[in-house]
Image (spheres, helix red, strand yellow):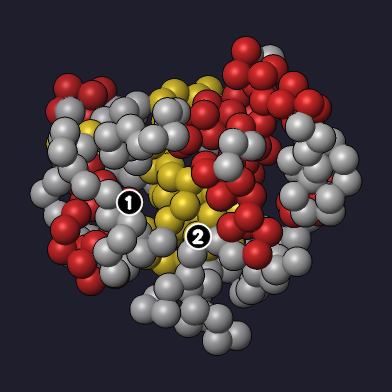
Amino acid sequence: MDLRQWGADLADLVLGRACLVCQAPGPSLCTACMASLRARGGPWRAELGTLDPRGCLPLWFALPYRGVGARLVLAYKEHGHLALSEPLGLLLADAIAAALEPRARAVCLLPVPSTPRSARGFDALDEIVRAAGCELARRGMAVSVARVLQFPRGHRSLKSLDRRARWSTIQGTMRLDLRIARSLPTGMNVVVDDVVTTGATTMEMVRLLRAADVEVAGIAAVAHQAHPGLPRSAAGQPGYVGADPRTRSVHVPTIDS
Ligand SMILES: [Zn+2]
């Protein structure tokens, strides 16, 4: 356990924190609720639109970004529940594993670059990716992380923009490190993010990687915020058009407690 994790656990204790799902005293996500979240049929798959003529890539995600999913991510990123990086990393690891071939024994994680540091003072995605990498390594995978793209200084966040504006604004803003890109393996690169909304940033990243002849196996995220502009599933749920690879049946997330 590192110092940050130790500090976060101590804060849980001192501040009398409780599970954000069931309110039981203790960590921000108790063991039982974590097991329950993982038992609800995910990770799920959504198809992200793209301007790249080579087409869509599936997004695998562990939680819908609403209800409990949104509560957990916001608690971690905005409200100081830093110990959530571990369970959110575990959920991201599940999504990453779903993006890979079932027998894959290695993975290279390509995190979405962070915008210039916010007032939070820490890189929220970094901590989750580190936890996900540790979890995948525990499962016997060889894990590497490559920061192949960056936003230049002065890049503004896309958060306040609508879908159309995000797609037009993101184009051409990221810089690819060709030296790193050329060293990436084939067939096991997964783009990772904490929350994917329109997919504008992740698909621009995929476009740039493909232009540099880097093969991307998929995109994985902790949570996905369905957007009315996305295709609809058979159940009419916006955004969730995919199938669990184990059953090939359509799943519609119902985590809304
Ligand atoms: Zn709980």
Amino acid type for the residue under numbered disc 1: Thr
* Image quadrant in which the N terminus is located: top right
Name the residue at 39% across, 43% down: 191
Residue at the image point whose x is 65% and y is 64% from the top: 67
Circles 2 and 1, Cβ within 8 Å, touching? The answer is no
Q: Residue at x 44, y 28 (%)?
A: 122
The alpha-carbon separation of the residues under discs 2 and 1 comes to 12 Å
User: Which quarter of the figure has residue 185?
Assistant: top left
Q: The C terminus is located in which quarter?
A: bottom right
Residue 202, numbered circle? 1
- For the question of whether residue 229 can be seen, the reply is yes
- Using residue 79 as the reference point, say whether residue 156 is left or right of it: left
Residue 238 placed where, x, y %? Answer: 49, 79
Q: Residue furthest left?
A: 172
The residue that mark 2 highlights is 224
- Residue 223, percent from left and from top: 54, 55
Count every numbered label the image shows and give the total.
2
Q: Is residue 92 above or below residue 199?
A: above
Q: Give the residue type at disc 2.
A: His
